[in-house]
């Protein structure tokens, strides 16, 4: 009996390792993990895309600073004490990652709900316009004449970014115990966060394409590795205290650049996406 259980455990582990290996290969081929970095570069080199961020910078930075200071003051010591039991000297690293993740999650939830929803939509649409994708942007908002891509943005006709729901926090709390596992647990925690945030980065794109839920799910499943790799890198960037708000905007730019490449077929990850676009 024990031998059978051992064999099942071994087979399961081998299967999971093979799955992770295949996903890693797919992610590397897709190049999707580069788009958050491309977003940073493109954002910094295109000053017109700064306008939505600058309009919300002061209140969001104030909120981010307050949340980060509060979390490290209140949550760091008790969580470090618990993690030290499981992680030993590595608890310092695990706890910092955990508190930063908690702070980032709170900032993302609160800022996207109350402060920057429209600014992120403007950033996504403005980036698409700067990449000559006016036809798809016109599906979700009015386009006017203007001196730059942001100035051309008219009234928003559709808003894709869902406001905060309890499911997001529940899922986050379910993942938290992974941090009790030294190093590997923290890595898994970030990967799982990335797996959810990757597809969410294209919520606006899916809406502009007018895809229903079934089509979105099929598309994400088909390109699961690409979206996970994008989400992991984007999540890591947004762990940076205070600067997480900046990276929320650069990640949005990166997601829009990826969407633009999907439309033109320039991305290595979108060879098979042409089929999705034809049927969309």
Image: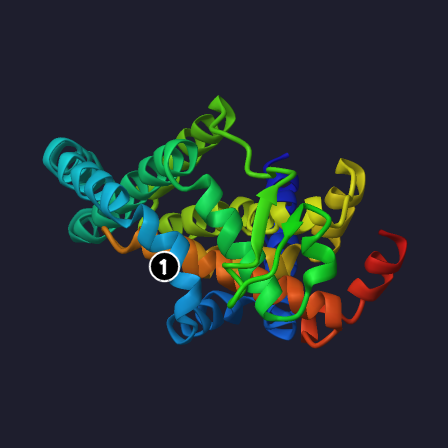
- Residue 59, image quadrant: top left
Q: Position of residue 213 (x, y in %)?
A: 75, 37
Q: Position of residue 137 (x, y in %)?
A: 67, 54
Q: Is residue 236 visible?
A: no
Q: Is residue 135 above or below residue 35?
A: above
Closest to the observer: 95 or 9?
A: 95
Q: Residues within 10 Å of mark 1 (few under 14, many from 20)?
A: many
Which residue sits furthest right? 279
Left or right: 93 as drawn, with respect to 226: left
The structure residue drawn at horizontal position 20% and vertical position 38%, both measured from the top left corner, is 85
Q: Is residue 218 visible?
A: yes
SS assignment at label 1: helix
Which residue sits furthest front? 145
Which residue has dot 1 on it? 237
Closest to the observer: 147 or 74?
A: 147
Q: Position of residue 185 (x, y in %)?
A: 38, 48
Q: Position of residue 94 (x, y in %)?
A: 25, 49
- Residue 271, image quadrant: bottom right
């Amino acid at each position: 009996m024990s031998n059978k259980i051992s064999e099942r455990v071994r087979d399961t582990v081998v299967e999971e390792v093979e799955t992770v290996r295949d996903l890693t290969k797919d992610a590397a081929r897709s190049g999707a993990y580069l788009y958050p970095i491309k977003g940073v570069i493109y954002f910094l080199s295109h000053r017109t895309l700064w306008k939505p961020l600058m309009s919300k910078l002061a209140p969001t930075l104030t909120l981010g600073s307050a949340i980060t200071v509060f979390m490290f003051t209140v949550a760091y010591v008790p969580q470090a004490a618990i993690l030290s039991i499981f992680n030993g000297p590595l608890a310092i690293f695990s706890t910092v990652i955990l508190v930063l993740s908690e702070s980032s999650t709170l900032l993302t939830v609160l800022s996207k709900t109350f402060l920057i929803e429209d600014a992120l939509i403007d950033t996504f649409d403005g980036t698409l316009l700067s990449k000559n994708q006016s036809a798809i942007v016109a599906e979700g908002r009015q386009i006017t004449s203007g001196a730059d891509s942001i100035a051309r943005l008219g009234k928003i006709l559709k808003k894709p970014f869902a406001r905060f729901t309890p499911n997001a926090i529940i899922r986050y709390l379910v993942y938290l115990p992974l941090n009790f596992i030294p190093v590997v647990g923290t890595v898994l925690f970030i990967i799982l966060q990335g797996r959810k945030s990757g597809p969410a980065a294209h919520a606006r794109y899916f809406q502009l394409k007018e895809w229903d839920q079934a089509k979105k799910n099929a598309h994400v499943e088909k390109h699961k590795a690409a979206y996970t790799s994008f989400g992991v890198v984007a999540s890591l960037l947004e762990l940076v205290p205070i600067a997480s708000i900046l990276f929320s905007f650069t990640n949005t730019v990166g997601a829009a650049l990826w969407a633009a490449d999907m439309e033109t077929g320039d991305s290595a990850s979108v060879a098979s996406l042409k089929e999705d676009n034809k049927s969309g």
